[in-house]
Each structure stands twice: as structure tokens, then as C-alpha cells.
Amino acid sequence: RATKYSADDISADGDTTMAPPIRTRARTHSNLSLVTAGMVPWRHGEAFYAKNPFSVINERVIVAMVGLPARGKSYISKAVMRYLNFIGCPTKLFNSGNKRRDQGLAGTDAKFFDASNTNAKAQRDQMTMECLDELIDWLFDATSEGSGCACGILDATNTTKERRQKLMARCALVKPAVQLIFLESICDDEAILQNNYRMKLDNADYEGRDAEGALADFLERVKAYEQVYERIDDDEGCALDAASNAEISGLAHGETSCSFPSETSLESLEDSLAVSRRQISYIKLIDAGRKLLVNNCHGHVAGRLVSLLHSIHLGPRTVWIAVAGETVNDQKHVLGGDTPLSFAGQEYAIEMCKLINERETLSRSAAGVTTAHRAMVLAGTLKRYDMMAEELSKEAGGRKRKVLHIQRLNELCAGSLDSLSYDQMKAKYPNEFKARLADKLHYRYPGVGGESYTDVIMRLQETVLLLEQLRNDVIVVCDRAVCRVLIGYFHGTDLPELPYMEVKGGVIEFKRNHSGFAVTHLPVAAGRATCSAGPGTIAESQSEEMKNLSLEESQEARRV
């Protein structure tokens, strides 16, 4: 059904009322008739661009890790950083162990971590507080314009109440206020611990040492922490103790670089701290996701954080991202549409299926898996995805793959410009063409269903969490824009760079390892993948246009 604009649909500045980004795209012939009839509304300025809600909501969050060594704190903190950056919340990691190594204390033995070693304990506490000060400075730099979210992660053991009270005391003095959330990783599963101990031998502290001696020293370090380890409890936020009072006194007399008003009195600092510490905010992750406890965590960032922690696990698995085959519209070099695979696209799908079957067999053999379970297929709802999924789900070894079609995996929608070529877009709508070149991340195509990369990132948040939750291997069939977003998530790519990532035809394999995911590109030998002329891509001619677009022209495009 053709989408028509009335006078009520167009605002005073020429913008149209935008539909939610997940809305079903208009059909090809309808959009083409709208464009040729001149029905695409005139837009200017910021009406071209989408906004991420994290750039509007004002929150400053500090996540302080808690737990014994080898409990997955560093892995979890990196996963949190990758996810929050992906959804648009600037996040940075501050690691106390890295600061120790930077200060020439790499390779220190277990005696340095003994609680009875008072000098070493003072050094460790000092380095952690320096990390916190650096984190707070960065947090305010990241939100210097007065709005937007930011999250800093303090990766340290923080295993004692005394240490955590010092962190709470320091954070309570920061103005404007910050939200401090403790994230405690508890693990008593011996199989997980033994695996984590082995992975710790790759730590810079044990570089060049024999594995047996390194493991023995690391286990001694763990024992030293276990002697003083105090798990977080609900009463921890009550009643200031002597250590916290001393910390407040030092802060109030300028013995820190932490941000707080100089005229603040000691009494008001104590009052502020008492209020903030009546209820401690914490999240407990037990046995790598078996159990999750949340206490007094509120806000947009905290909500996203809990969603991620409810999803991640440390189990082995493989994710195959399969770039879709060439379509009939690809052959015509036009945007979007819902056309089936071309003959070359069908050949590509058959060969890609063989490739994934081979990789799946190798993966299962290496892992010692003998069950007949096959990887599930996730795909969009358009014709090309259905044809690809049908080929992948064909029976092999007596079993068919399960297929889940979800609309969120459909390609970036070009709205009213769907089924135009880039040459037509440039000739008929030069302002749209230039606006897209000026800011490809935020540029939103006009009309019903028109999307930006920012919109695609937002609609794929739930899909990313689903990929984190799945315990078995999975195949994701998608076009290039969605492929860029998913690869960008696993790679931790900065959002401004994401729309310009090169995506080659074939399969991108992400295999879980100790540090995250190992990446392998697997080319498909037959047929053709979807071409570069799609709504989420840059054609070769466009790349030349972008090279010739000066900074002034780029800025002017946003003001047209």
C-alpha cells in the first residue's frame, strides 16, 4: 500500500512524522511511485539525523568490580564496556593491575598481595584510589556538555569492606553526583575455576615463567586474598566507621584530585555520605551467570547493565554471520526492496551451506561433541533471507536445523527512497545524498520505516543479548548493514567507524576463547554475495564522492 503524506504529516521545518524504526518497510513498487511522484518531503538541518537516547539522558555511573582473582572480573568488565559502548553509552575501563605493572611492579610474587604486608597493602590501596580519581576525571570529561550518559569501570579486587567504604566515601563527595554500583563476581564451580587459573598464566605478570611455577605462585596469591575476602552484604552501606571518617577528613582538606566543591564543610560531607550509604548498590553474578542478585540499582544505564549480565556466560560456542546472497535488485544496483535471490545468489547460498556444515563438523570434533545437535539459524523476514535459511535448514545427518525468522534482522530500510539507485538519489535528492555522506551513522532515510545506522543499532540490542544468551552454536543470515553492526559489537568498534567497515562476501566466524571471540573470515567459492550498492553500504562511486567532500561541505550538509 502506498504511503501518502498530508499537510498534517509535515512539520513547519519540513520534517515528517517518523515511524518507529522496526515498522514493516513499504513495498518496492509503492515507494518507487512515491519518489517519482515527488512525494518525498523536503527536509533540512537536524531533521536528517537520528539521536541516540544515551546522548540525551543524563547519568554518570561508576561500576566497581569485586571478587577474588580468576573469577572472570576482567572478562566481565570488558564485556560490559563493549556492550555499553555499542548501545551508545561512552564507557572506559580503568584497571588497577595495569597501573601496578605500569609503575614497574609487573611480575611481583604472591607476597605482595599478602594482607600482612602493610607496605604493599598501602601501595595497592593507593593505586586503586588513583585509578578511581582518573576514572572520575574522565567521567566528567565525557559528559562535559552537561548531558548524556557515561560509565567508568574500576577493575580491581576490592575484596574488603574497608576498601569498598573508601570507594563509597570518595564517590559521595563528587558533585554533580555519580552512581556507584559494585559488581561482584562469585565463583565456586571448580571446573570454571581450573579453566580460569590456566588462562591467568597468559597474564603479563607471568611472562617468560614456567607454567608450573607460575600456577603455584598464582594460587598463593588467591589464598592471600581469600584470607581477607568479605562478600558484599546489604548492611554494608550503614554506619560510618573510623576508616571512612578518616577518608572524609582527608578529602575535605584537599588531599585528593577528586571533584567536589571546595567550600563544602566536613559536616555536610558526612551528611551526604550517610545518605548515599544507607543502601549499597550492588550486583552479584554467581558461577558465571547461574544466579544473579541485584540490589538498589536504578536508572537507564543500570537497567542495560543488568540485562547484559543476565545474558552473558563463559560457555564455548561459535557464531557464524553469513552475508546474504545476491538479489534481483542487486543486479539492478538499486536500494533495498524485497526481491528473491538471483541465480548467482542461489549458487552462493548452496556453497555457503556446504562451508558452514564443514566448519560445524570441525568445531564439534575439536570440542569432543558427539550429539547430533545442529546450529540454529537466525534470519530476517524478507524473501532472500527465507531462501538462504531454507538452504541452510536442509536435512543433513538425519536432522534439520531450527530456523527463527525475526524482523529485527532485516536490512537497513531506505524508507521512501527504497528501490532507487544511488545515481538516482544523487540526481533527484542531492540534499539527502550529501546529508548521508556528512554523517552516515546518524543519517536517517526519509519516509515511513526509513532508518539510520543508529536506529539499526537500537533495534539489534535485543538480538545481541540473544546471541550472548544462547548456549549452542548459531548462524545469523543478514545483509551488509546489519552485518557491520553485529561485527562491530563483537569487535568493540567505535560507533563513528562502524558504517564504514569493509564487509566481504562469505561467512565471518566468531569462536569463543579466553579473551572473547577469535575471528575468521571464510570466503565462499561459488556464486555472488549481495553487492555493495545497498542502503547500508557505500558504492565505489560514493567513496569517491566522500573523498571529495571537504570538511566545510560536510558541515554545510548538516545545515542545508
Image: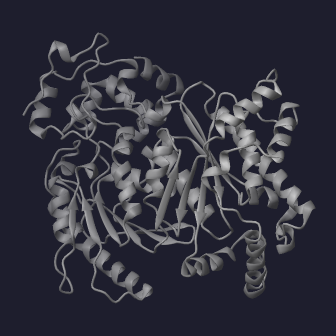
Position of 180 with respect to 490 (left or right) is: right
For the residue pair 364 and 81, the one nearer the viewer reads as: 81
Above or below, 210 against 558 in this view is below
Position of 541 with respect to 36 (left or right) is: right
Q: Hey, which residue is sitting farthest left in the picture?
A: 1
Q: Is residue 344 among what the camera can see?
A: no
Residue, x 40% and y 50% (percent of image)? 485
Residue, x 29% and y 56% (percent of image)? 478
For the residue pair 326 and 77, the one nearer the viewer reads as: 77
Above or below, 188 against 78 in this view is below
Location of residue 486 by image quarter: bottom left
The N terminus appears in which quarter of the rendering? top left
Q: Residue 99 placed where, x, y %?
A: 78, 55
Position of 358 with respect to 56 (left or right) is: left
Q: Is residue 439 among what the camera can see?
A: yes
Residue, x 39% and y 44% (percent of image)? 457
Above or below, 331 against 525 in this view is above
Position of 36 with respect to 364 (left or right) is: left
The C terminus appears in which quarter of the rendering? top left
Total marks placed: 0
Q: Residue 306 placed where, x, y %?
A: 47, 51
Colouring method of the image: one colour
For the residue pair 350 and 552, the one nearer the viewer reads as: 350
Q: Residue 225 placed where, x, y %?
A: 75, 69
Residue, x 42% and y 44% (percent of image)? 499
Q: Residue 529 placed where, x, y %?
A: 28, 60
For the residue pair 518 and 228, the one nearer the viewer reads as: 228
Q: Hey, which residue is sitting farthest top in the picture?
A: 12
